Amino acid sequence: MVIGAGGQIGRPAVQALARDGWEVTAASRGGGRDGNWPGEVRTRRLDREDDAALGALIGDGCDLVVDMVAYGARHARQLTGLADRIGAAVVVSTVSVYEDGEGRGFDTMGEPDGLPRYPVPIAEDQVTVAPGDATYSTGKVALERELLSAADRLPTTVLRPGAIHGPYSPLPRELYFVKRNLDGRRRRVLAFRGESLFHTSAARNIAELIRLAAARPGSRVLNACDPRPSTVSEIGAAVDAVMGVETETVLLDGPARASVGSSPWSVELPVVCDMSAAERELDYRPVVTYPDSLPETVEWLTRRLSGQDWREAFPTLARVYPDLFDYAAEDAWFAGP
């Protein structure tokens, strides 16, 4: 059973498992409306917060539960409470759980001296933030800890992706470049000389890790990222190539000037994850590179954006990055004093 099957990772995961011979139940809020599934895939409507509905859906048992939307200790206890009816689990977490060893992490980036200084690359044994319910990161740690503490009853593979990309994303960072190109903005500004590295994770590569973990149940934590991270400049150039446009990029030596130069990948220090554990334990090989994955993402973004304001099309992105397209500020900056 795949919980959250209609989402960005759920769709390719269902397809990958079905191709591998699994009898898949795709569970989501929308049920059968949430995806164009292969004919052998069963679809079911599920409210993730409804304990009774989840138990009823699992019924007498299933060999594998893949959970895209689990968050916090309560969701972990939902699954461990059904451990006698579940063979194994694969659960999606996030790289934002990592701390640099000095109390700095994703949650402190906006604080004075709060910028995390991670090792390059980050291995899975890197210290994490404390579990809790205060932030997304602490909630994911609580989820992980609860599940791994029940390893003897429910073998669980925890996957930690980075900046997830692909169609059906509620937070499509690539829109930063796609919309500018669609709007005819042929000049852009990138902070930190466009060299920021925030490790990306293709939804299809995460699905491949899910497929591999399903075939080798066990309790483990694995990073779930692309073969190599692209810099922000490289991402912009790749989007331009897909859209067939030429742009001029102005590079800032330091941070953004308010909204000017800021992008969804703009980090001063690199966030790069070590993928050797996945390669070693699951024989993982990525099924797609970042540039190769872009055409379907660009096509989906262009279609979703057609005829509506970007904030309406992508409300989550607008909430996280409200000044993503502050063209007036950019024009004023280009004009100078």
Image (spheres, rainbow, N blue to C red):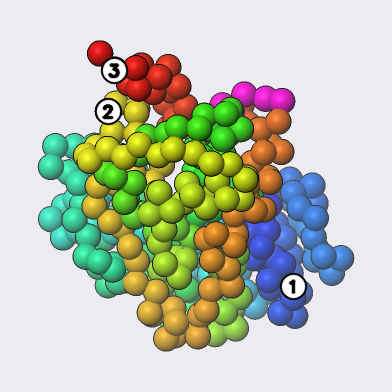
| In-front residue for pair 172/125 | 172
**Label 3: which residue?**
336
| Residue at the extreme top of the image, as rendered | 337
Q: Residue 110 appears at what percent x and percent y?
A: 24, 37
Give the foreground label among 3 and 1: 3
Query: Which residue sits at x=47%, y=46%?
Result: 236
Give the foreground label among 3 and 2: 3
**SS for callout 1:** helix
Quadrant that contains the C terminus: top left
Image-quadrant location for residue 189: top left
**Label 1: which residue?**
18
- From this view, report whether residue 58 is shown above or below residue 319: below
Q: Residue 217 appears at what percent x and percent y?
A: 53, 82
Q: Amino acid at mark 2?
A: Arg
Q: Amino acid at mark 1?
A: Ala
Earlier sequence position, callout 1 versus callout 2: 1
Image-quadrant location for residue 16: bottom right
- Decide: few, some or many residues near mark 3? Use Cα within 10 Å; few <14, some 14-19, many ≥20: few
Question: Which span is picked out in magenta?
Answer: 307-311
> Marks 1 and 2, Cα distance to the nearest angstrom?
48 Å
Q: Would residue 136 appear left or right of 211 to someone viewing this image?
A: left
| In-front residue for pair 28/184 | 184
**Label 2: which residue?**
257
- Decide: few, some or many residues near mark 1? Use Cα within 10 Å; few <14, some 14-19, many ≥20: some
